[in-house]
Amino acid sequence: VNLEPESHLSSDKLSQKALGEVVRERLPKKEGRMRLLAGLVLLSSALAVVPESIVDIGTAGNFAILAAGPTAYVTATASSVTGSIGAGAAITFTGTHTGTSYPYGGTLATVNGAPDSELNIAIADFRTAYNAVKTRTATGAVTASSLMGCPEPQTVPPCPIVYTPGTYEWLGVANAYSDIVLVGGPDDVFVFKIKGFFTIAALKEVRLVAADASVGPPVESNVVWHAENYVTMGAGAVIRGTILSGAAISFGAGAKVYGRALCEGFVVVPAGVVDEVYNLKEIAARTPSPPPPSPRPPPPLPPAPPPSPPPSPAPPPPSPAPPPPRPPPRSLLRSSSRLRPRSPPRLESCGMPVPRVPALVG
């Protein structure tokens, strides 16, 4: 039966399709097929995946790598770690580290000789989460097989193995020889409980695929890999999610964890990557958006110019020049030349002559 996912089918439809193929292959007679199909439908309804509750890791989520035991240590060489590192004994690190280191006995981890309280609380939260998953009831398949994914070599379909949301349990060790595909949405939870060792082969990858492209794929913070013994990653392998190991975690060269590596024992990372990428998303989701900047006050208006003085009244128009005097009539001018003053009369008084006054020539 090929369970390879098809982009247009939901997980329920995938299950129905697989059941139908089983019925057609195993029972050629129509009547027998109908009886078995009815029984399988009832069984699939009884085993239907119910919504899973998230695994709360508390303040252990503040660490990308945590080695909780009193003698536990972290050794990372030429590696890249995004997030804080905590260890019960010591931390040896070379490479690129974004975060804080919390080793017991280190100057950053002691306050007046007592272990750092933040690290102690994180270790307690890790152990609480580990024990809660250990007693969690499986809602998906419970298997005694050691196989997680395709057989080695990959000659038998289906490959890769597809898991829908739920809690799955392996009663012994679990070996992933092929890619593992988790199909769901950002609110779906995937929990894998392994009683023994958990090994993912070199160059194999855990992939997160959206069941509905409009809402997006599962997120790393909702994926948990719980192993009661060692977790071993081959060279170049990629795991997405939180590893909770009751023993130790060992990376092959170039292996990557997009999530967290939390365990009771040691963590060895040679030239690997641990990136608590989804923690950054959670912080962004919890951090309220900054308030919009206050609008700038408008610039002050320039002072109003002083009022202009009223315009001076226009001077009155000049009085018209008086008309020139009219010349006398020509008749008078002509006759004036003929005017002669009369000679005063001769007056004699007491025998004395009166002097003549010369005539005025006009």
Image (cartoon, grey):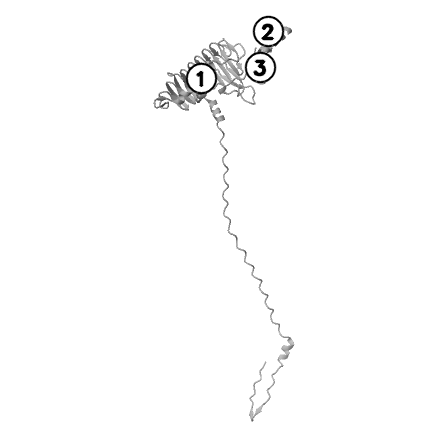
Find residue 244 and report its horizontal and vertical position in percent: 45, 16
Q: Residues within 10 Å of mark 1 (few under 14, many from 20)?
A: some
Image point (57%, 91%), residue name: 348
**Amino acid type indicated by mark 1:** Thr
Q: Quadrant of residue 197?
A: top left
**Amino acid type indicated by mark 3:** Leu
Judged from this view, the residue extending furthest toward the bottom is 351
Residue 167 visible in the displayed image = yes
Q: If you read the primary sequence from the N terminus, does the residue marked by circle 3 or circle 1 appear first?
A: 3
Image height of 333 relative to 213, above or below: below
Q: If you read the primary sequence from the N terminus, does the residue marked by circle 3 or circle 2 appear first?
A: 3
Q: Secondary structure at mark 3?
A: helix
Q: Of residues 152 and 291, which is closer to you in this image?
A: 291
Find residue 54 and report its horizontal and vertical position in percent: 50, 19
Q: In this image, 332 relative to 247: left or right?
A: right
Closest to the camera, between mark 3 and mark 1, is 1
Q: Secondary structure at mark 2?
A: helix
Q: Of residues 11 and 159, which is closer to you in this image?
A: 11
Judged from this view, the residue extending furthest toward the right is 331
Which residue is under mark 2? 26
Which residue is under mark 3? 14
Which residue is under mark 1? 128
**Amino acid type indicated by mark 2:** Arg
